[in-house]
Image (spheres, rainbow, N blue to C red):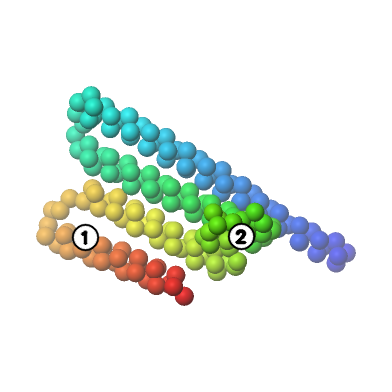
Amino acid sequence: MKNFFEKMLWRSRYLTLLAVWSCIVGMALLFILSALDMGRLLIEFFNVYALGHTVPDFHITVVSHVITAVDDFLLAMVLLIFGLGVYELHIDKLDIARGNPAAGKLLQIESLDDLKDRLGKVILMILIVAFFKNVLHVEFKEPLDILYMGGGIFLVALAGYYGHKSGEH
């Protein structure tokens, strides 16, 4: 009975494949969606500059769309890193990635802490991108608003600095 129970427990790790495949599907959908959005933006850009159509605040619209695409691409990378990390931690190592220079160190996960560190850095980048996307739409109604913006930029820079410092260890 004990042997049967232990086999069932050990085999239950294959349920993590649901998370792995869900992450890979989500990653693919985000990459495709963001690429299609950028294609639509390219067509709109062509309409405005080549055909002379006018769109109010078009520059801000373009920058906002590009930042959104970067944000979506970063989230897709989080899903990729998480999916591959879960697979390597619970199922098996990806032999094809070992020794392959294209794989890099980013996709080779050795422990749960390693996975958390890699995800944390990409999530920090997502938050930084989201902050700057929101900065585009800030209206300065009072002089104190400018100080708040400066404080926010300082905190983002500080987070980037400490995120980089933690990667050196």
Q: Residue furthest bottom?
A: 169
How many other residues sit within 10 Å of disc 2, few (<14), some (14-19) or many (≥20)?
few
Residue 42 position (above or below residue 63) = above
| Residue 115 point in image, percent of width and height | 54, 63
Q: Is residue 163 left or right of residue 50?
A: right
- Amino acid type, callout 2: Gly
| Residue 65 point in image, percent of width and height | 32, 41
Q: Residue at x 49, y 63 (%)?
A: 118
Q: Quadrant of residue 128?
A: bottom left
Q: Give the mark nearer the N terminus: 2 vs 1.
A: 2
How many other residues sit within 10 Å of disc 1, few (<14), some (14-19) or many (≥20)?
some
Can you see residue 87?
no
Q: Residue furthest left?
A: 143
Q: Is residue 116 left or right of residue 50?
A: right
Label number found at residue 149: 1
Secondary element at tag 2: loop
Secondary element at tag 1: helix
Q: Quadrant of residue 159?
A: bottom left
Q: Which residue is mark 2?
A: 99
Residue 140 position (above or below residue 53) = below
Q: Residue at x 38, y 48 (%)?
A: 70
Q: Residue at x 33, y 33 (%)?
A: 42
Nearer mark to the viewer, of 2 and 1: 2
| Residue 59 point in image, percent of width and height | 22, 40
- Amino acid type, callout 1: Met
